[in-house]
Image (cartoon, rainbow, N blue to C red):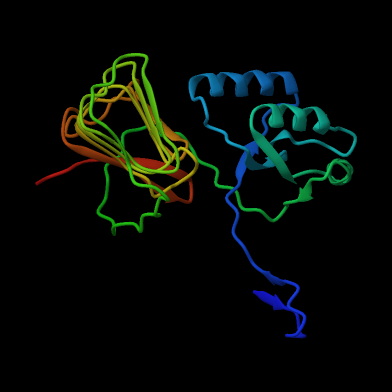
Amino acid sequence: MAIVSEDPSQPCYDIKSADLSLVALLLKTTDIQAVSLALQQQLAETPGFFDEDPVVVDVGALGLENDQTLDLQALMVVLREHQLVPLAIKGAHEALLLKAKGLGLVDASDARIRRSLPVEQPLTPAPEPAPVVAATPWGAMVIDKPLRSGQQVYAKGRDLVVLAMVNAGAEVIADGHIHVYGALRGKAIAGARGNTQAKIFAQVMEPELISIAGVYRTSENALPQDVWGQVAQVSLQSGPDGDKLLISALKF
């Protein structure tokens, strides 16, 4: 869609459609202090994860009635303190929506937010067409030394390539793909900002945790024997019941 000023001699502006990448905050409590503490913990574990990201506050899961409310003003203060910029609200009843608009939030009732389900059972991958991978704005970040327990690497806005081992207790995070040309024994989080096309590749797949776009699997749910310790990849499959991780061995 484009709306162009009709008088070509007065080209003051054009109005065109635009895409904006948003973060969705799906609230599960009205306790703003608890939200603040949870955000503090996440930023302590992943410094720089939020960087003035615009956010939609989704209150649909709270089940608030017209006589119940949420301290939106306090929530907005907390979000801004943690490098998030609240722009819109979703799932609010009429009274809460009116209050939100008074605070400068827009109504995002029609926004589509991906809700992911954690994987609980081993999955047997089925053949599927190769997905179209979203381009990243910069070249991949390359790490050429082993990562020890307690070390963390975050490739913001790009892929991450590790040319060595990721030891247990270490953590690798990327907004794009993660390639580990060695043993992956720590945590690997790909598509950290919601890229569902991201994948994780490892020469030796023995992770403590793997995650793509928020869907995760821990070592408590053991990988199948034909994948554990093998050259393997992890991808995300969407279905009517949510998103699931697919882990498959790579054959050459």
Q: Image check: 91 left or right of 50?
A: right
Q: Residue at x 25, y 54 (%)?
A: 127
Q: Residue at x 79, y 45 (%)?
A: 105
Q: Quadrant of the N terminus?
A: bottom right
Instruction: Pick the residue in front: 20 or 69.
Output: 20
Q: Image check: 214 left or right of 226?
A: right
Q: Image check: 109 left or right of 141?
A: right
**Farthest residue in the left direction?**
252
- In the image, residue 122 lies at what x, y percent? 31, 34
Is residue 90 among the parts visible in the rendering? no
Q: Residue at x 48, y 46 (%)?
A: 241
Instruction: Pick the residue in front: 19 or 233.
Output: 19
- In the image, residue 136 lies at what x, y percent? 40, 50
**Relative to 219, is 109 above or below?**
below
Q: How many marks?
A: 0
The image quarter in which residue 208 lies: top left
The image quarter in which residue 53 lies: top right
**Relative to 121, is 18 above or below?**
below
Is residue 104 among the parts visible in the rendering? yes
Instruction: Pick the residue in front: 217 or 20.
Output: 20
- In the image, residue 170 lies at what x, y percent? 34, 19
Q: Residue at x 83, y 42 (%)?
A: 100
**Farthest residue in the front direction?**
9
**Relative to 95, is 143 above or below?**
above
- In the image, residue 117 lies at what x, y percent? 48, 38
Instruction: Pick the residue in front: 15 or 98.
Output: 15
